[in-house]
Amino acid sequence: MKKDDFWPKYSLDIGRAIEVIKEFNNSVTISAPELLIWNLFRDDFNFKRERAACAVVLLDGLWKTQLFRHEEDFDRITNNIAECSRKIVANLAQLKKDDLKDYPEKVYRIAKEVFPIVLGRPSQRQNYSFTSKFFHWCAREHFPIMDNNARKAINRFQKRHNLKRGILVPSSVTDSTYIEDYKRWIYFYSALLNSLSPAQSQALLNADHASQCHDLRVSNTLLRVLDKVFYFVGKSRYNLFKE
């Protein structure tokens, strides 16, 4: 596949996206957990076992990543993060501010290095959602959040742009393809970021900041703001296109 195939030009209705952001931020039951997670991760994150344990428990409990279904995963994931902390820090330190937009292949390469630390075997899909959310909060400008609601919305959004099947974020993913699946998320958001003008990007950031409850306000990245849009659209089937 040619490199240019990964950079289609997307047309996002900014007005409708802003409506979605405002409706999303109107829920304090969504905003409060986000503030708690942001407070834990917003400083330079260290991966000592105690803080890693707090991050794992808090993220799973507040964002419902289903770790409770496999209780042994709490200790396994916490221990793996602590034991591989130098590898994680070294990889994340390579990322520069605009790498998702300009060098998605670099973000994908680093994801291949760090995701297995949490996921276990390269083919393991269990805890895929948790893994993407954990690394998103570690590097909020670089790692998209994989969520089934957002997946449905992105798949519909890409189909409306007549994308080739080989680069679509699929409506579902098999157990053996999680890292290849995540590559499509990385390249989707890279192309979307490149499709937005500076004014559009700033309008989305401004709308997110202004519509949050003042006492629960979080300083979000553009990637997180876009994730809010697709999560809410997938959950509610809100239409991002003018009919």
Image (cartoon, helix red, strand yellow):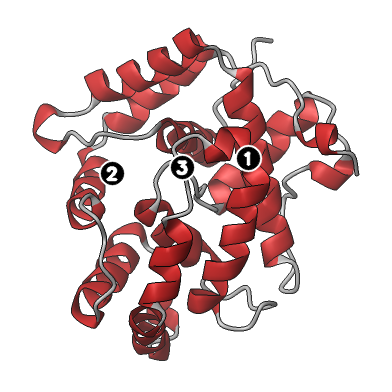
Identify the disc placed on residue 220.
none
Residue found at x 31% / y 63%: 59
- The residue sitting at 49% across, 59% down in the picture is 132
Q: Give the CA distance from mark 1 to mark 2.
A: 31 Å
| Residue 51 visible in the picture | yes
Q: Which mark is residue 30?
A: 2
Question: What is the CA distance from the residue labelled 3 to the residue labelled 1?
Answer: 10 Å
Picture coordinates of residue 211, whole percent (x, y)? 25, 21
In depth, the one of 85 and 136 nearer the eye is 85
Inspect the image, locate mark 2, and give the three-letter code of the amino acid beneath it.
Ile
* Left or right: 222 in relation to 194: left
Residue to which mark 1 is pinned: 103
Residue drawn at x 75%, y 73% as measured from the top left: 176
Element type where label 1 sits in the image: loop
Q: Which of marks 3 and 1 is nearer the N terminus?
A: 3
Q: What's the residue at 72%, 46% (across, down)?
A: 169
Tell me the distance, in whole angstroms, between the alpha carbons under discs 3 and 2: 29 Å
Q: How crowded is mark 2: few (under 14 residues within 10 Å), some or many (20 or more)?
A: some
Q: Nearer the viewer, mark 3 or mark 2?
A: 3
